[in-house]
Image: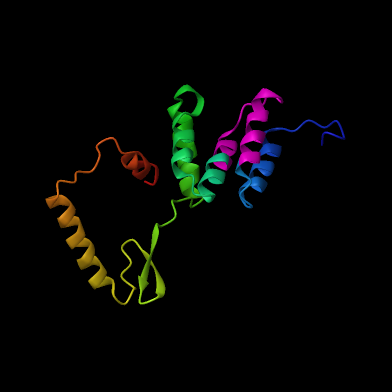
Amino acid sequence: MQECDSEPDAVTFVAVLSACSYPGLVDEGLHIFELMESKYKIQPSTENYCCVADMLCRVGRMVEAYEFVQKLEEGNWENVDKVRKAMRERGLRKEVGCSWIDNGGYVNPFASKDQEYPQSDEIYEMLEGLAMEMKNAGYRASQNSNLDAISQFNE
């Protein structure tokens, strides 16, 4: 487009940002997003914001995606709500966390609330015991955690 002296518009940026999202070109996509306003003087649309949030989510940068959505346009909550709704409609959700369990040299993946794993009952009993030991040892979860904010993002 630059070689042809053609100016991009917001729709062009949706296509380019989407193209950056799939292969995980987040830094390039963020740079292009910044150019929208700084170089091309284009006000990002809801779709542009969704592309950036999608781009961040696809590479596991959920907190950064959440913070990006939170600070849209000096707290313009109407826009934030539109982006959240559009993300839900696109099916964008946080990926399920996964752990690996080494059982006699064989590594097994195990997701949260996974009831399909053959030894899930035993694992949950062990986790419950560990949680009780931590509680008895005086461990208390931090009240300053961002987990509440992230769970609201997934609603």
Q: Magenta span: helix, strand or loop, mainly? A: helix
- Where's residue 14, x and y in %? 65, 40
- Where's residue 18, x and y in %? 64, 46
Report the front residue among 88 and 115: 115
Colour theme: rainbow
Q: Please say whether residue 95 is one of the residues in the magenta stretch.
A: no
Q: Which residues are magenta?
A: 27-51
Is residue 127 left or right of 48 when viewed as pictured?
A: left
Q: Please say whether residue 41 is one of the residues in the magenta stretch.
A: yes
Is residue 69 left or right of 25 when viewed as pictured?
A: left
Q: Does residue 21 lie above or below 103 as drawn? A: above
Residue under the image location 44 percent in, 38 percent down? 66
Residue under the image location 46 percent in, 47 percent down? 88
Q: Does residue 46 lie above or below 114 as drawn? A: above
Residue under the image location 87 percent in, 34 percent down? 4
Q: Does residue 120 lie above or below 73 as drawn? A: below
